[in-house]
């Protein structure tokens, strides 16, 4: 997230679609841990710029497309734009 752009990318998991493969936590352990059953627990922070590429890779690698990346406008928490790799067009 940068103050200059006014945007921040956040990760979100569709828990209905998630099968607990754990690929996301392997690719992005800085922001994703696993619960005792193997399901992801996400950090409640925007994705830092230095981890943006890793986050995109984790989203793209999700076998069930359950991991989503959404960009929100700072100051307008209800305004969100879905990322290109959000699993939806």
Image (spheres, helix red, strand yellow):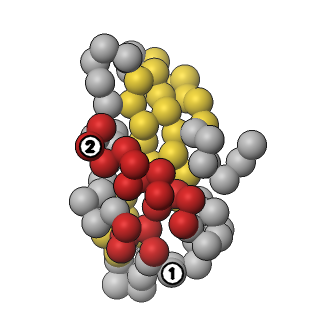
- Can you give x and y, in whole percent of width and height, for residue 30 in the image? 25, 60
Which of the marked residues, 1 or 2, is nearer the chain's N terminus? 1
Of 50 and 67, nearer the camera is 50
Quarter containing the N terminus: top left
Disc 1 target residue = 21
Disc 2 target residue = 50
Q: Secondary structure at mark 1?
A: loop
- Can you give x and y, in whole percent of width and height, for residue 27 in the image? 37, 67
Of 49 and 32, nearer the camera is 49
- Can you give x and y, in whole percent of width and height, for residue 53 in the image? 40, 49
The residue located at (28%, 66%) in the rendering is 29
- Can you give x and y, in whole percent of width and height, for residue 21 in the image? 51, 81
The residue located at (55%, 51%) in the rendering is 68
Q: Would you say residue 45 is visible in this rendering?
A: no
Find the residue positioned furthest to the right: 89
Q: CA distance from mark 1 to mark 2?
A: 25 Å
Using the image, determine if residue 67 lies above or below residue 75. Answer: below
In the drawing, does residue 33 fall left or right of residue 11? left
Using the image, determine if residue 78 lies above or below residue 20. Answer: above
Q: How many residues crowd around disc 2 within 10 Å: few (fewer than 14), some, or many (20 or more)?
A: few
Using the image, determine if residue 49 lies above or below residue 27. Answer: above
Q: Secondary structure at mark 2?
A: helix
């Amino acid at each position: 997230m940068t103050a200059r752009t006014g945007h921040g990318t956040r990760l979100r998991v569709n828990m209905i679609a998630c099968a607990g493969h754990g690929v996301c936590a392997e690719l992005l352990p800085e922001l994703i841990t696993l619960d005792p059953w193997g399901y992801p627990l996400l950090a409640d922070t925007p994705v830092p710029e230095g981890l943006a590429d890793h986050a995109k890779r984790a989203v793209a690698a999700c076998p069930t497309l359950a991991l989503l990346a959404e960009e929100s406008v700072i100051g307008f928490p209800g305004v969100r734009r879905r990322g290109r790799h959000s699993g939806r067009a």
